[in-house]
Every structure is written in C-alpha cells, then in structure tokens.
Image (cartoon, helix red, strand yellow):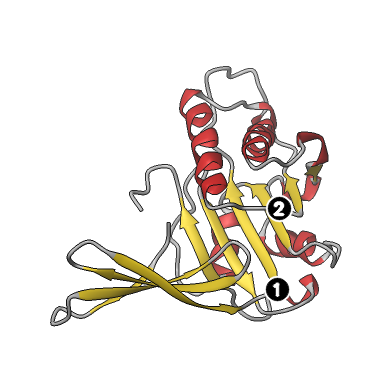
Amino acid sequence: MNRDVDCDEETDYSVETRLSTSGTRKRRVRWKHGTESEFATARTGTKQLILVRHAKSSWQDRTLSDRDRPLNSRGKRDAPEMGDRLARRRYRLDRIVSSPAVRALETARTIAEKLGYARGSIAVEERLYGAAVADLLDVIRGVDESVATLMLFGHNPGLTELANHLGPRPIPNLPTCGVLHLGFETDTWSAVGYARGAEVLFDFPKSQG
C-alpha cells in the first residue's frame, strides 16, 4: 500500500494519511509502542482511475504474435494475489476496460473475479493495445459520466508514461501487475489530465507495503 507518512525523530508517533477506495481521506496515528488509531475523514475526488499493467507474460511459444502471448507461471500467481489485495481493501468497480491482448485480458478477468465484477462485463478496447498517453486519455475521457471508478488494464510504456502525466510524483516504472489508483477532484472524465490526481494507492506484487 502506498503511504504518506510524516515522522519526527523526536516524537513517539507517526501520522499516515491515506485515501480510501471510495475517495475518503483517512489519517492513522501509529505509536512506536505498537498501537494505532484512525480518525478524521473528508470527501475528496469524484472520479477514481485505477491503472493496472498486465501480469508477467510468457515468451515460450515463439510462434505466437505479441498480442496472443499468455501469462506465465509467475503472472498466474501475481494476478490473483493482486486481486486478493484489492479485495481486502474493499475495492468496488463501476467499469473495467482492457486491452485485447491475451495477457491483459487474463489479468483483467482474474482480478475482476476476485472483486466480484462479472468477467463478461469487461469491455475490450482495441486502442489500449500499444497505446500512447494521448490514446489512453482519449479512452478515459470517453467514459460515461455515470462511471465513478474506472479500472484500465494495459501495457508499458504507455501506462508508466500516463502515470507520470497524471500522478503527483515520478514513477520510474509501473511493474507487471502493478496497480496505480489516482483520485481526481472532478465530476467529469473529460477533465482528467488537465490537473494532476491524488495518489490513493501504488502497489505491485513485490511491494512489501
């Protein structure tokens, strides 16, 4: 889980500020003797964007085209693990949109199942395969305004470039099966990209957070 932690060496506590999956800001005090308390919530952001890079894919069958490559054994472990992590955080999605590439769709279907989202409701968007930032923004800005929480499954380098275009801090690389959740204080998807979002969560399989 991504955290914004302020800790003074002269104090016996740290303050962690988090944004929940519903866009609610929470502050948690962690005391050095091991106890913690959570308090103060305030509504922020009305559009929630979750970027997910496909899990690790296989290169074993060299006869397959790039878009037909499936997940490898590590990818098949990582995708359900990330789905479980998101489920524990009580994520609820209004729409999932995926690249048509097999590795992206396998990742999307696995995570959707963990979150109680119907696999058959996953939208496949051709523009997400090999998408540059402009293509990704076109997809996002075209989403129906009834959708409050959108999850996109795609590829690098486009997703990492989009993360750096939209997020509040540099991210050198969005790892395979990495998840970046950004919240935007806007009521329209067409405004996304004109101001940076707030980072809610940055998580990936090898993260220790």
> Residue 154 versus residue 187: which sits nearer the camera?
187
Looking at numbered disc 1 in the image, what kind of residue is underneath it? Thr
- For the residues bearing labels 1 and 2, Cβ distance under 8 angstroms: no
Q: Quadrant of residue 66?
A: top right
Does 194 appear above or below 199?
below
The residue labelled by disc 2 is 93
- Which residue is painted at 86% across and 63% down in the image? 144
Q: Quadrant of residue 205?
A: top left
- The image's mark for residue 193 is none
Does 91 appear above or below 27?
above
- Which residue is painted at 75% across and 48% down in the image? 97
Within 10 angstroms of label 2, few (less than 14), some, or many (20 or more) residues?
many
Element on which disc 2 rests? loop
> Residue 156 versus residue 167: which sits nearer the camera?
167
- Which residue is painted at 36% across and 69% down in the image? 37
Image quarter in which the N terminus is found: bottom left
Q: Quadrant of residue 195?
A: bottom right
Q: Considering only order in the chain, which callout, 2 or 1, is on the residue closer to the N terminus?
A: 1
Looking at numbered disc 2 in the image, what kind of residue is underneath it? Leu
- Which residue is painted at 80% across and 62% down in the image? 147
- Residue 4: x and y, percent? 38, 71
Q: CA distance from mark 1 to mark 2?
A: 13 Å
- Residue 122: x and y, percent? 78, 41
Within 10 angstroms of label 1, few (less than 14), some, or many (20 or more) residues?
some
- Residue 120: x and y, percent? 81, 35
The residue labelled by disc 1 is 46
Q: Is residue 59 left or right of residue 28?
A: right
